[in-house]
Image: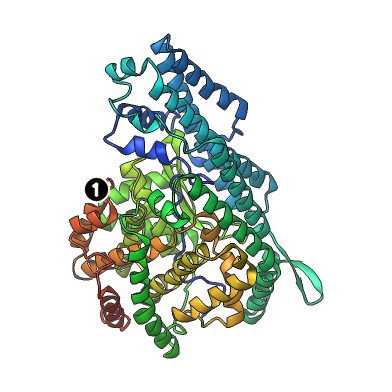
Amino acid sequence: MRIWRVTALILCAALLLTGCSSMELIQQIMNEGSTPFAEVMQELAGVEPMVPFSQMPYTQPDEAALQELFDTATTLAEEAKDVNALMDALDAAGEAYSDFYTQTAIAMIHADSDQTNEKWQEEYAFCDRLSAQVEQWMEQMLQACALSKLRGRMEREGYFYPHELDAYEESDSFNDEIVALYQQESELVNDYRTLCADPEILLDGGTVKLNDYLAREDLTEEAYNAAYLAYLQQINEEAAALYCELVLIRRQIAEKSGYADYETFQYDFYGRDYVPQDVEAYLAEIRALLGPYREELIGSGEYDAITYPGMTEGRLMSGLAESMELLDPAAADAFTYMEEYELYNVSTSLKKAPTGYTTYLYSYNAPYIFVDTYGDVEDILYTAHEFGHFLSSYENGLMDVALDLEETYSQGMEYLTLQNMQTILSRSDYEALCRIKLLDTLDTYTQQGAYAAFEQAVYALPEESLNAETLNELFSELMQEYGCGEDGEEFDRVYWTQLSHLYEMPFYMLSYCVSVDSALQIYERALEDTEDAWEVYRTLLDSPHLPFLDAVEKADLESPMHEGRAKAVMELLEEQLSFPDA
């Protein structure tokens, strides 16, 4: 097993891109019954003519101009003299809001495409820091509308529905104190990104650029792993200090927002329809059954049998296009649109950010996928994962989908693609991809389960215990408990600082663990009948408004939280790892 490859798919779906978990109130308003203001905001997404991504211009957002637009609408609402002028001002502010997040997404894509490009790193950091302030201006504007004497007139004319603005009458989600905390959070996250962007390490008595060193063609696996471990050890103290600061700031954000703890705060933000106590029992079953099973497979050499046949970007995209044509015309249409307008980056480069996500270009009403690929057959899974998010956004637009359901779309697409690849890839490549995905499934349960347990434990620690040594020991212990300690104790002690989700998307990784169960059930259907599996997937895709567990029930799937699921997963993996039909 190669240490430098993270076999679990830790690709994030940054569908609503903000550096500080903002836009929550706006999302709620936009998705409760398709209200008139929601329709206005939807129409503002797509005001620009669609062009390929390479032709989309970037302009740094003008902070003063943005504030003036929101202030103008706020003042007109407070003065309550001219309803038409107010509605025009609201439209202008809404368009600027959409454009701001479009520019933020463009900056992020460029920054992640080349982490050594200081210009784009600075541009994204600027937008990220500004996002909390923009949310405050939006909230203040809508609160002014909620309290305005013109509110009744706007409701009668259909600009707002009755009660649409009720949530803003006493809203204080983005007061000055909370905005300041969000901005501190953003600065710490960007400090972390800078720390990891283009590091230099001390090696063999000299200093080398890590990315250049790892790109050497004559580098052995042993030398690669040694260099990477040296890098992890070198940044551990600084990266841990940044994370501890983030934990403390996020606790304050939760407290100022009326929550007892940050974990519950994030569960609500992600739209989860279960509580942390449910997760503890779920993770315990994974630790007790799937952890030992993974250790057993490692001991038997199952992981050593993994191979990674090469895969060019051209073969990757043509194979996926063929798979989508086999799957359904709707999937094929979305894939064609993605290619036509260059709404993807699946190139292989050490300069890219080691992550994957789907973001949204609001002004063009278009999703965009970013995947850090390896140049081998596993890239099929990474890209299919993000295309699942792309298809969801392509079909459902700005609908605010519960995170676990969103991740079921992505992981379900991996399994559907895997089944189709049986007729597209050579027999040997297909068998390699099957082994990768089946063992990756087990890793998603165990590794992501360990990561989720790590977050739970860290955010429960007293402040005096938040330090590098405590966190290193905790992570190493959990990796062992979940059957994931084969890379060595020293590596496990320091690797956690490379899990960018811990820094940028707290409590997100649990969703990989939960949603893979529903996705795996889709795969079970696909093994018998791909069309039937697509219908199950289609049912979920057509239910973006439902809470996750309700959508799972509607699709006639078993809840991941149901007792005995871990055993069922183990039995399916045992059966499929024999590759009876490959």
Comparing 135 with 196, the one in front is 135
Comparing 280 with 368, the one in front is 280
Q: Residue furthest top?
A: 81
Q: Can you say whether 275 is above or below 567 in the image?
A: above
Question: As shown in the figure, which amino acid type bears the numbered disc 1?
Answer: Asp
Q: Residue furthest bottom?
A: 300
The structure residue drawn at horizontal position 30% and vertical position 84%, both measured from the top left corner, is 578
Q: Residue furthest right?
A: 205
Whether residue 180 is visible here, answered yes or no, is yes
The structure residue drawn at horizontal position 17% and vertical position 61%, both measured from the top left corner, is 556
Q: Secondary structure at mark 1?
A: loop
Question: Residue 98 location in percent, x, y?
Answer: 47, 32
In the image, taking residue 488 as reference, residue 399 lies left or right, namely: left
The structure residue drawn at horizontal position 26% and vertical position 57%, both measured from the top left corner, is 549
Question: Residue 74 location in percent, x, y?
Answer: 48, 21
The structure residue drawn at horizontal position 41% and vertical position 63%, both measured from the top left corner, is 510
How is this picture coloured? rainbow
In the image, taking residue 57 as reference, residue 163 lies left or right, namely: left
* Residue bearing the label numbered 1: 542
Q: Quadrant of residue 553?
A: bottom left
How many numbered discs sit on the rendered protein? 1
Estimate how packed mark 1 is, as few (under 14), some (14 to 19) or many (20 or more) residues with alpha carbons within 10 Å.
few
Comparing 284 with 313, the one in front is 284
Question: Residue 566 location in percent, x, y?
Answer: 30, 76
Whether residue 582 is visible here, answered yes or no, is no
Quadrant location of the C terminus?
bottom left
Question: Residue 107 location in percent, x, y?
Answer: 58, 42
In the image, taking residue 524 as reference, residue 74 lies left or right, namely: right
Q: Can you say whether 231 is above or below 155 in the image?
A: below
